[in-house]
Image: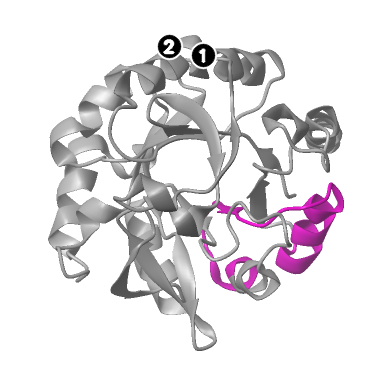
Amino acid sequence: MTQFRPCIDLHAGKVKQIVGGSLSDDDRTLRTNFESEQPAGYFARRYKEDGLTGGHVIQLGPGNAAAARQALAAYPRGLQIGGGIRRENAVEWLQAGASHVIVTSWLFDAEGHFLPGHLDALVAEVGREHLVVDLSCRAREGQWVVAMNRWQTPTDLMVDAPTLEELSHSCAEFLIHAADVEGKCEGIDEALVRMLGAHCPIPVTYAGGAQAFDDLALVESLSGGRVDLTIGSALDLFGGQRIAYEDCVAWNRRRQGRLEG
């Protein structure tokens, strides 16, 4: 059954909600939907109190390590960490309290060529059970291609059935932001969610474009309940006016009750 997964997106040390396609090395292009006055630990403690699991902390660029560590300390083993993860620092983040490390850009060279040896090295370092592979992507001619470097650089790795099957043997979960719709609150990429539900053999979380509470039911329907949903800019917790955080918490509790029943 589809679950709501919480998030903490960090930029310049602050909790923010950003239009994903606007991220680049030039901050003048940045489009920010929300910047919180509350520190990262506030959101982590709230997720812990509400029994939310499988959420992620994403460091969007430099200057976020202290805020990320604060969040992990507030909810030990309750959050995944991504952004700048590589073999050399992965264990350090697990020791800081992350349940999993999330890796994207380190799996590619500067030109965007996939490096299977890097994935093997990371699995050897932390174990498949502690690794989430981020296949955040952009649409290209009816398909999806993984994008790295804050979703600006396309790679040679497609998000399709063969990729999902092959990489599923090296990680515990997938995280997939639809970068073209991330932060826009204009609707999810339904075709991508449907494809993930049909072909992903391990747990997967989709993020991008959620605009209404009914999107949880839509993702559940499109994916057969096999894809979880992260909601950001539309959530009232992040200044949005379309989706109540408490409704999402209640959604998870209802589904948890079904599983326990």
- Is 216 part of what is drawn in magenta? yes
Q: Nearer the viewer, residue 82 or 171?
A: 82
SS at circle 2 = helix
Query: Where the C terminus falls, by quadrant?
Result: top right
Residue carrying label 2 = 73
In percent of width and height, residue 120 lies at 18, 54
Mark drawn on residue 41: 1
The residue at the point 45 percent across, 59 percent down is 136
Side of 158 relative to 156 (left or right): right
- Is 179 part of what is drawn in magenta? no
Side of 153 relative to 119 (left or right): right
**Outermost residue toward the bottom in this view:** 141
In percent of width and height, residue 199 lies at 56, 72
Disc 2 marks which amino acid? Ala
Disc 1 marks which amino acid? Gly
Q: Residues within 10 Å of mark 2 (few under 14, many from 20)?
A: some
Mark closest to the chain's N terminus, 2 or 1: 1
Q: Which residues are magenta?
A: 196-224
In percent of width and height, residue 186 lies at 73, 61
